[in-house]
Amino acid sequence: MKKIKNNIIWLFAMVIVLSSCETTELDLLNDPNSPPPESIDVNFTLNSIELNFSEFFESTTSAGADAVRLEYMFDTYEANFNNTNADLSGAWTTAYAGILKDVEAVIRLSDEGNDFFVQAGIARILRAYTLMTLVDYFGPVPLSEALQGDVGLTFPTTDAPEDVYAAALQDLNDAIADFGKTTLNPPSTDLLYNVDLSKWTKLVNTLKLKYYLNLRLVNQALAATEIQDLITEDDFISTPDDNFLWRAVSSNLPQSRHQYYIDEYLAASTGDYISNYLMWTLAVEKGIEDPRLRYYVYRQVDAFPSDPATLDNEISCWNDPRPSTYPPVDAISPVPLPFCSLFGRGDGYWGRDHGDNQGIPPDNAKRATYGVYPAGGKFDDNDAEDIDPGDGLDGAGIWPIMTDSFVFFMRAEAALFLGTTDDARTMYENGIRASIANVTGFLPNPGDFTNIPDSGDIDDYVDEALNLYDAAASDDDRMDVIGKEYWISLFGNGVEAYNLYRRTGAPNNLQPTLLGTGSFPRSFLYPNVVVDRNPNIQQKPDLTVQTFWDNNPAGFIQ
């Protein structure tokens, strides 16, 4: 079960534009937890922005991960991503009533001569990411008429998505300018990078890389020039120490733990399923076990039931014919895409197919669940034991928002299609190795386990991945190989996975939706908290509306 972390989903657009109004009646609509600009503490507000940012990322990553099979999706796209989707409603409200409003307040205080340039720069970076993600997910969104505190702008219209993207880029440039000011009054606390401006600067350049890579389909020349300039400057996130993460913590406050851990371990039985396609990719597809498998996935059992009656009760699809919506065995991959479960493994990788909407059987204590990365759960050392609160890292997991491995994969894509000076194969290998290092290095006590992959296991896997790249016959085929490894590395980050799939079509062998109906969301519907309260925002006709940088053909992804 996915949690709605922001419980103040009350008024949408009226809240986001009226919360700073001075009229007495309008003040009643202010979030009591968010004071007006004239009374805020700038450092407290910066921390509030960072906390809201983590919630925004969590909500958007959940929707994106569901769509691209990193997480299990129940039912059809239309049923799952209608305008009442809790994750997307929460993301929208957190963005406007939380992040964007508070960023305006911090920048205003800085502009008034208080020398809060570091706070303003950090706030601008987080606003840039938020604006880009809103456009990536929804297309046109309010900006120029939002957050103005003018009664006449109670119902803001949407801005062109290109303009919102341009505003995000301006924020990134302005943040660097802020960091370069000679008079600084830095914050006492920075929850993300501990006031390390060199790391914030690396993040800015990395977000610019992401920005221009998303634009490569609509302005290839600009993307090629700007990305090459960034490569020449070479000031990206490039080591694990630079990684941009939100760190959950283990404490006596249950909600401080990682959300996956809360949903699964604190309930002492799994509330969600792991995607069969994800486990098949890690355990079966290459014929060699992915070194990240036992970190991503923890098995509560080490075998499937053999008794037909038990199977009927717990995995009712076990004897069903393979759906006609699935490709023939050899059509896309020489290894059959999974259907129903990974029975061929026979060792308890118990999940669900994409879009399976059957009733939930009594299998909570048998399903595979989240492991040590990124959820802070258990490493799978063939224990085959039920999960309990306190297991593993006790929920001290992470949200991997932007990492060195992501950068290498983005640079591989740019080299392939934009002709940059990077070598695509080298970037691809660097991305794989960086991802494996991030995942395996997350376990603090590897010596306590017997099934930790060693350097030989990792080299064997990388060699197999390079063989696949070398065997690819075209750039599109090579992109699919790169994209599959990028997708694997993105476990815990549905935002970049969702963008990757729409931008490149990779991975090209995603498991079909089980019911075989509906359209992949090329963008998401506006939440009902938007369209029900703002007559100037009209709902989209359906999920097929593409965001401005996605000019790939209709229906090219499923």
Image (tube, rainbow, N blue to C red):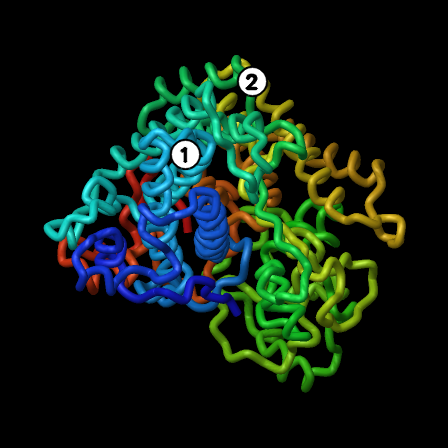
* Neighbourhood count class around disc 2 (C-alpha, 10 Å): few under 14, some 14–19, many 20 upward: few
Q: Residue at x 79, y 71 (%)?
A: 385
- Could you tell me the amino acid type at mark 1? Ala
Closer to the camera in the image, 146 or 356: 146
Q: Is residue 213 above or below residue 139?
A: above
* Gap in angstroms between the C-alphas marked 2 and 1: 25 Å
Residue tagged 1: 120
Q: N-terminal of the two: label 2 or label 1?
A: 1
Residue 455 circle label: none
Farthest residue in the left direction?
152
Residue tagged 2: 234
Closer to the camera in the image, 217 or 197: 197
Q: Is residue 548 above or below residue 180?
A: below
Horizontally, residue 246 falls left or right of residue 138, namely right
The residue tagged with tag 1: helix, strand or loop?
Answer: helix
- Could you tell me the amino acid type at mark 2? Asp
